[in-house]
Structures are given as structure tokens and as C-alpha cells.
């Protein structure tokens, strides 16, 4: 395998966004390694995409303990890429992982107990060959473990040097309030909230989460920004019956919602064309118009799709008329 040397000009055309009032800076588009990036069969493809992204100034790679066709395999593959190519650039990278969803049987195989979070991060570090991750998330709230225990564990992991920053994911507003209070009391570097958010799924807006994050000067990062590819030119005319929608977006294809969603996609596509963008590019730009939105995590598996997503950064401004038109379409 040819020795990898990073593009010397990788930072020339990329700007970075600050997560709240912290020292954490992320590219507006981050690469998530969820679907299609685990197990040995796709390692070469993942390597090509990861290195291409880094050459374009994308320094943030978003993972979790359960990512990959088999749990942990995405981290294992990313660890192989670090070892073979990216470890000389470790100080330039922001690597995140999460724990909360199912990993193994038994009472400590999921959720957010101290036992599970502690063991999970240790396992993630071993899979990736790292001493620390830059961001570690509680992947979802635990209905049976006190939030105090979860917050204490995340704080401990930072103080032990296993994580630099803390995030939470999939926490609704009221639960986020509780975690903020606990982190502020401990002085934990809680800086970012990862949420399911896109043009078709705006629950976090309606729930008041953005107002809460802005009030406490915290960053937001969106996963599923294209609703698993639904917000693309490809599906603007016809959504297949077997479209693999994520559970957080499933309601937009249920019952008569599918016909409404199809009409929205068609109208959004027309507007994107007027802006000189693909629908995907406009959908990403629309998310990034918010100052609170530090980054969006795209989950593509191909370089052409990734480059198409990255091109959204060429135009992230909207006129008042365009924003009004989008609201009418999405209403």
C-alpha cells in the first residue's frame, strides 16, 4: 500500500465552527462512520473516503461503539486507518465515540450506567488504538440509571484523560436541562448535543432544544441531516416503498404522510434548482444557517456523494423570501 501523505493545502478552503463558547472547533460537515463502514469487506473503501475527507480539511470523524454491520467493527476499521495512515496527524483530528445502545447481553450491555460507559470507552479506545477520544457522548438517556451517575461517570472519564470533551445525544429538552445543571455543578466540559434533525424532522425546534443550547452557549450537531438520503434529487420524484428510513424519521413516511413528504421533496427540489444546488446541498445549507449548529454529520459511503455534500458549503445563505418559501413547503 502506498504511503499516505496528507494534502498540504487541506486547510486553505475550510472554515471551522466553534461549539458554543468552548475551544472545540469542528468542520461544518463531519464524516460519520455508521452504516457501511464496518467489517473487513469495506475497509479499502472506508480508507479511501476517510483520507479523501481529511485531504479536504474534514478533521472530525464521528463513531460509536455499536457502529458497523457487526458492533464495534466501524471503530476497528477506523483504528486500522489510523494505524496505517492517520496517526502522524492525530493532533489535527477530532475523533468522537458514543455509548448507550445495545452491545452485548446482560445488565451492562446498554444504556448509561457507570459500569457500561466506563467499559465501553475502554473497549472503543482499544479498537481504535487510541489513548483518548476528543468527544465522548452518552448516546441516549437511561430511564433506570440516575442522571447523576451518568454525569459523574462522564466527568470522571474526562478527569482520567480518556476524553477531552463531553456530549450527549438523543436527549430531549427537559433531560438536557437536568444534564446541563449536573455538568455545570461539576465543571465538566460538556460542549455539544447531537440530535436527529433535518428539514423533514424538526422536533428539536418545536421542543425548544435550540433555545436551551443557545442560552447555555452549547453547540449542536445534527445526525441524519438528509433523512438517510431522502432529501436528495434521487427521491424528489418517487420514494420507494421499501425506503430504509431511520426510526427517528419513520413518522414522515407513515400513512398519508408519505404523499405529503413526496410533495415537499418535489417542491424543495425545484427551489434548490433555482439556487443552483442539489436538494442535498440545500438541505445541509439550511441546517448550517443556524449559528448554534456547529456541524452536520453526513453518512455517505462514496467519494462522489461526499463531494456533493461538501459543495453545500459554497452557498449557505438564504434570502428572506427563500426561507419563507421553505416554511410554506414544510408546513
Image: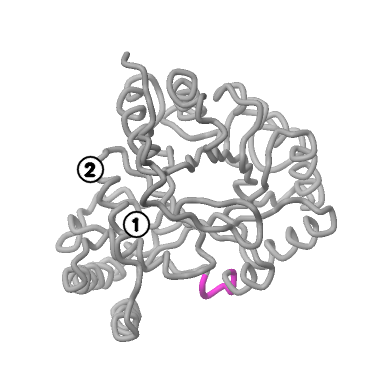
Question: Relative to 150, does residue 79 appear above or below in the rendering?
Answer: above
259 relative position to 20: left or right: left
Tell me whether circle 2 and circle 1 mark residues in contact (CB < 8 Å): no
228 relative position to 68: left or right: left
Residue at 64% x, 37% y: name it.
Answer: 110
Question: Relative to 155, does residue 86 appear above or below in the rendering?
Answer: above
Q: Residue furthest right?
A: 185
Label 2 sits on residue: 304
Please tell me whether mark 2 sits on a helix, a strand or a loop.
helix
Q: Which residues are magenta?
A: 205-209
Residue at 20% x, 54% y: name it.
Answer: 240
Please tell me whether mark 1 sits on a helix, a strand or a loop.
loop
Screen quadrant of the C terminus: bottom left
Question: Relative to 12, does residue 80 appear above or below in the rendering?
Answer: above
Image coords of residue 158 (percent x, y): 75, 40
Is residue 255 within the magenta segment?
no
Label 1 sits on residue: 226
Residue at 38% x, 41% y: name it.
Answer: 10
Q: Which is closer to the viewer, label 2 or label 1?
A: 2
Q: Gap between marks 2 and 1, in whole Å?
A: 16 Å
Among the 4 quarters of the image, the one containing residue 257: bottom left
Q: Main secondary structure of the magenta part?
A: helix
Residue nearest the observer in this picture, 313 or 184: 313
Which disc is residue 10 wearing?
A: none
Image coords of residue 327 (percent x, y): 35, 81
Image coords of residue 83 (percent x, y): 49, 19
Graded by Cα atoms within 10 Å as few (under 14), some (14 to 19) or many (20 or more), the crowding at tag 1 reads many
Screen quadrant of the N terminus: top left
Amino acid at each position: 500500500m502506498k504511503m499516505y501523505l496528507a494534502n498540504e493545502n487541506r486547510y486553505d478552503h475550510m472554515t471551522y465552527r466553534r461549539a458554543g463558547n468552548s475551544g472545540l472547533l469542528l468542520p461544518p460537515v463531519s464524516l460519520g462512520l455508521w452504516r457501511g463502514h464496518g467489517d473487513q469487506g469495506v475497509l479499502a473503501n472506508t480508507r479511501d473516503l476517510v483520507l479523501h475527507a481529511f485531504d479536504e480539511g474534514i478533521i472530525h470523524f464521528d463513531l460509536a461503539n455499536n457502529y458497523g454491520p457487526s458492533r464495534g467493527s466501524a471503530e476497528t476499521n477506523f483504528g486500522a486507518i489510523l494505524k496505517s495512515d492517520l496517526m502522524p496527524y492525530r493532533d489535527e483530528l477530532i475523533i468522537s465515540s458514543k455509548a448507550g445502545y445495545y452491545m452485548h447481553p446482560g445488565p451492562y450491555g446498554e444504556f448509561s450506567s457507570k459500569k457500561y460507559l466506563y467499559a465501553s470507552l475502554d473497549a472503543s479506545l482499544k479498537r481504535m488504538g487510541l489513548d483518548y477520544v476528543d468527544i465522548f457522548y452518552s448516546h441516549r438517556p437511561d430511564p433506570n440509571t440516575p442522571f447523576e451517575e451518568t454525569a459523574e461517570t462522564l466527568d470522571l472519564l474526562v478527569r482520567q484523560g480518556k476524553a477531552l470533551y463531553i456530549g450527549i445525544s438523543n436527549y430531549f429538552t427537559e433531560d438536557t436541562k437536568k444534564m446541563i445543571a449536573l455538568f455545570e455543578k461539576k465543571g465538566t466540559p460538556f460542549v455539544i448535543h447531537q440530535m436527529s434533525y433535518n428539514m423533514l424532522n424538526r422536533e428539536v425546534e418545536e421542543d425548544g432544544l435550540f433555545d436551551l443550547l443557545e442560552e447555555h452557549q452549547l453547540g449542536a450537531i445534527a445526525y441524519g441531516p438528509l433523512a438517510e438520503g431522502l432529501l436528495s434529487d434521487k427521491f424528489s420524484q418517487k420514494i420507494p416503498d421499501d425506503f430504509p428510513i431511520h426510526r427517528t424519521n419513520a413518522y414522515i413516511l407513515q400513512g398519508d404522510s408519505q404523499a405529503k413528504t413526496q410533495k415537499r421533496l418535489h417542491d424543495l427540489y425545484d427551489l434548490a434548482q433555482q439556487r443552483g444546488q442539489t436538494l442535498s446541498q440545500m438541505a445541509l445549507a439550511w441546517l448550517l444557517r443556524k449559528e448554534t449548529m456547529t456541524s452536520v454529520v453526513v453518512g455517505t459511503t462514496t467519494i462522489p456523494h461526499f463531494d456533493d455534500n461538501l459543495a453545500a458549503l459554497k452557498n449557505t445563505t438564504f434570502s428572506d423570501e427563500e426561507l419563507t418559501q421553505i416554511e410554506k413547503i414544510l408546513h
